[in-house]
Image: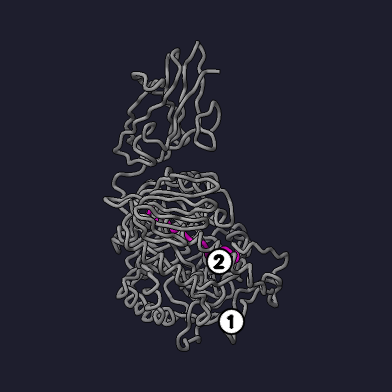
Amino acid sequence: MIGHIRYNSRDLGCKKPFGAVTDDTSVEFTLYTDLAGATKVALCIFPDAGEETEYLLTPGAAEGGWVPWRLTLPCRNAGLWFYHFFISYQGNRYGIYRDDHNRPALAGDCWQLTVYSADYEPPSVAEGSVFYQIFPDRFHKSGSPDLRDKLRPFSVHAATDEVPEWRPGPSGKIENNDFYGGNFKGIEEKLPYLADLGIDAIYLNPICMAWSNHRYDTADYKRCDPMLGDDADFTSLCDAAHSHGIRIILDGVFSHTGSRSIYFDALGEFGDGALSAGKDSPYYDWYRFRTYPYDYECWWDVKTLPCVEEMHPAYLDYILRDEDCVVAHWLRLGADGYRLDVADELPDAFIAELRDRIRREKPGALLIGEVWEDASNKVSYGKRRRYLFGDELDSVMNYPFRTAILNYAAGGPAEELAACVMQIAENYPAPILNRLLNSLSTHDTERVFTRLGGLSYSTREERSRALIWGDLYETTLERLRIAVFLQFTLPGCPCIFYGDEAGLQGYEDPFCRRYYPWGHEDPRTMGLHKTLAAVRHAHKALLAGNVEILRADADALIFRRTAADETLLICHVRQSAMDIPGKLIFGEHTENCGDLVHIPADGFAILAI
């Protein structure tokens, strides 16, 4: 036994400043021991995949029985760093590492230090914004589009309340070629509704010409899908959105194209693609043929999605280097940035160059990456990614928060939610933290209402017609209130998947992609989203504040958001009532008691202190 050691990387008394730091910052480390006989304490720090360097800490005067050992270390290189400590005591040398709960241990993982560029300046307009994700075919239809050039075959549902087609087609595969007819004009017609809801930005799933209803099988990067409209319709949508203070973010699908595209042309529909023209095609070198023509690399072995060589000069020219490249084309038509599909499959160099180009074209353009894990230390295809060091992404889809929030709302431990929140807050650069895309549902997941309902069915046929109702509906609604409350009060940008605010239900794809239930919305879920969006817009601490967990146990979750001259306490109480001093800003089942706010069980409150 070597006595007691105290080090907590989230305590400013042990590490200052908190969390990720810029590459022009010095970090103050302090480790405490109660060992009068300790002769040496060393910090061992190393860059990712690099060699370890050891620095000695200097002992100070004892403080309440603890001896502080201190070191100030300049951080000059952006990247991911790891560190731990050694202590020399009674002739032995002991390694001090972190464990899963960030408490000192004698064995385990190293602490992480994220260092990012001091020059990193993401678009300020995105901070704390409320996003709204739209699957274009399923939101709203207006008029009749010109379908003469629409890739066939396809079918159009006779009624918008029909379930999306989930059964295999004639080929024996699920075709994803059933449509409802949602279009640009339909979205434009509903902009007043979105503005009233409190939306600042719309994230659109793919809009380029494609065969499928999801449109991730791009057929022409520079053309709107005919069912959605044309360039003029898209520009009209963007102009109208901007007049409401709403930005338009597109889905960038750059790791693969569709096989029925002008570039690959598997069916010979266009005459100049890699399969139709062979090596004479200007697009032949875009693709990764193992044995021409039918053995090629494709996305997750889906033959209709051939992978591209993202770093091939011809592809780079077409997507982001030429004067009229793809990204410039859409930004000039009115788009305000991109969400990158499967960012893990795009080279870091491609992402960095893409960011530079969209910034040159439109300085305020935003670049968001689809990353499902902790993006600060993500490894994909055996390589550590550089997403968050300042020259690539402005934000990522924050799936770790989604998982933690839904587990908590369904009755899971508050401690697990708190651990997730503080891990992201510690690992991510401060400029990114309040730009994270916090979704509870997406086109790739089951609907939040369905997830919180907790029902499980073994067959797709059962899931296609399953709905939550009755007593379980009311129970699920209470869970939803918890989830949405946290979505709108934790750091980042709450992102509503179209229809979640209306109480839309659905299991996995395609059941999560039902048409918006116009005229059949639940006023309670609508009111919840609208109220929280308004509260969020009114308080800087919710838009741009830092976060600190004050309590996380079986009875209550309380955290603090602080920005400039505003401090808010965010409270959710499960089992025991409590009185907290403060001015009530938002509350559920709360009452004012003089200078105290009484919060009974299962109550919510946002308090100014």
Q: Which residues are magenta?
A: 434-451
**Of 435 and 332, which appears nearest the observer?**
435
Residue 241's disc is none
CA distance for labels 1 and 2: 22 Å
Q: Tell me: 239 left or right of 478.
A: left
Which element is circle 1 on?
Answer: loop
At x 39%, y 61%, the residue is 586
Label 1: few (<14), some (14–19) or many (≥20) C-alpha neighbours in 10 Å: few
Q: Indicate the amino acid at tag 2.
A: Leu
Q: Is residue 393 above or below residue 525?
A: above
Which element is circle 2 on?
Answer: helix
Q: Residue furthest left?
A: 565
Q: Quadrant of the N terminus?
A: top right
> Mark 1 touching mark 2, by CB under 8 A?
no
Q: Which residue is mark 2?
A: 477
Which of disc 2 and disc 1 is earlier in sequence? Answer: 1
- Residue 181 position in % (x across, y down): 51, 82
Label 2: few (<14), some (14–19) or many (≥20) C-alpha neighbours in 10 Å: some
